[in-house]
Amino acid sequence: MSTLSLPTFFDPKNAQVWGYRPDLARLALDAFDFKRMAAIRGAGSDTVKLAIVPIDAQEDFSHPAGTLFVAGRSGTGAVDDAVRLTQFLYRHLHLITGIFPTFDTHFALQVFSSPFWVGPHGEALGPHTLIVADHGGVLNNIGLDGKLILHDVKPRPEMAWWLCGGNYPWLVKQMLHYVEELARGGKYTLYLWPPHTILGTPGHAMTGILTEARFFHSYVRGVQGHGEIKGGHPLSECYSVFGEEVKTRWDGVPLASKNTRFIDVLLGHDVVVFAWQAASHCVKSSIDDFLVELVARDPALAGKIYILEDCMSAVTVPDGAGGFVADFTKDADAALDRFRNAGMHVVKSTMPIETWPNIPASLAKLAS
């Protein structure tokens, strides 16, 4: 069976609609007709199991109205990515065994939110700034240009009662440990983001055009939908779906653990496809962590991983004058090169699956 036709209800303009919500009852009826007309079998009969992992396909990242729209350099990045990824899902519905979206899930006060921090005199900190440790073990708030904003910043004292039983000195030590561990790991500097994907807000929801495709897949193929939650730990960033950025406390006690359950779920598939937002952060970190696990188990497993490079964009922060205060595109490009060198495959959604390198022969036959 070759690629499928797009369903009649699909409208790419819905990628531009904040809060678009499909009629799921109507969608279920359409799915039964689509399944019958295209003679599509249930996912349980797949001899080659293909999983697709849309990382954080949520409203706040997907639309200019979101609090952290991933615009890329084009200015319309995530909107365009949504159209391409949705078309890919519909055209390959008969080949996709499972869709495993992740959900970045946050609360009001977390280590990467500016209200978590105060200056030496109780000053507020702003988003799109950094927290770094100086050589004297003091935490400072700096701008993206590296210039000092506030010296000797600390976590808010009034949080200690619910974070660490009221032991504020412990919390201060933990934050220094956290920032130093980030620097030692070499992946990220502690970045203060605007509030985004807060649980219970519209921005946390999966963007509507992908919700529609996700449920249509479930209805057509008779497979339960999934959702992997990440990002709720107040004392650690969690760009990767496979675990927090820092997993230890300053006193040696574990703070968090690796999500081995989800790793095992994905490795139960023959082909694993990653996509969505942001290429420079959560996608990059998730694949980085996955690669570490693959290398530890069997480096050849990297050959089953595919990355849809045209269904993801990098974080950019416009300066209001046609340029960028921050542009993480080079980080995303460097990550793709690293993944290629490790044996993973970087492909485009418009490439026929049968032309993807190292694709299982039986899957190529179904796709052609």
Image (tube, rainbow, N blue to C red):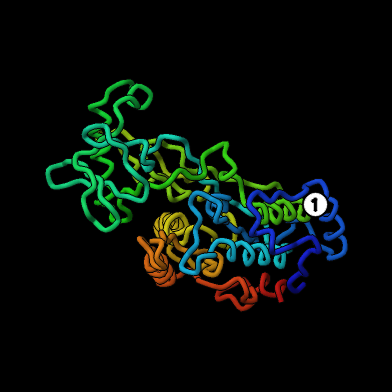
Q: Position of residue 255 (x, y in %)?
A: 35, 36
Q: Quadrant of the N terminus?
A: bottom right
Give the quadrant of the C terminus. bottom right
**Which residue is at a point 48% across and 58% down the rendered structure image?**
278
Q: Is residue 335 visible?
A: no
Residue designated by label 1: 27
Name the residue furthest front. Answer: 321
Tell me which corner region of the image, top left, top right, bottom left or bottom right, holds residue 321.
bottom left
Say which quarter of the image contains residue 175: top left
Who is closer to the viewer here, 220 or 155?
155
Mark 1 residue element? helix
Q: Position of residue 269 (x, y in %)?
A: 59, 58
The residue at the point 69 percent across, 62 percent down is 13
Task: Name the residue nearer the viewer: 262 or 131.
Answer: 131
Relative to the observer, which residue lies in front, 253 or 150?
150
Q: Residue at x 66, y 55 (%)?
A: 17
Q: Which residue is situated farthest in the left direction here?
A: 136
Residues 325 and 182: in front is: 325
Residue drawn at point x = 47 percent, y = 46 percent:
260
Q: In the rendered view, tell whether residue 237 sits above or below residue 158.
A: below
Tell me: residue 170, above or below residue 102.
above
Q: Residue 273 at what x, y percent from top left? A: 56, 62
Q: Is residue 298 shown left or right of residue 50?
A: left
299 with respect to 86 (left or right): left
Q: How many marks?
A: 1
Q: Amino acid at mark 1?
A: Leu
Occupied quadrant, residue 291: bottom left
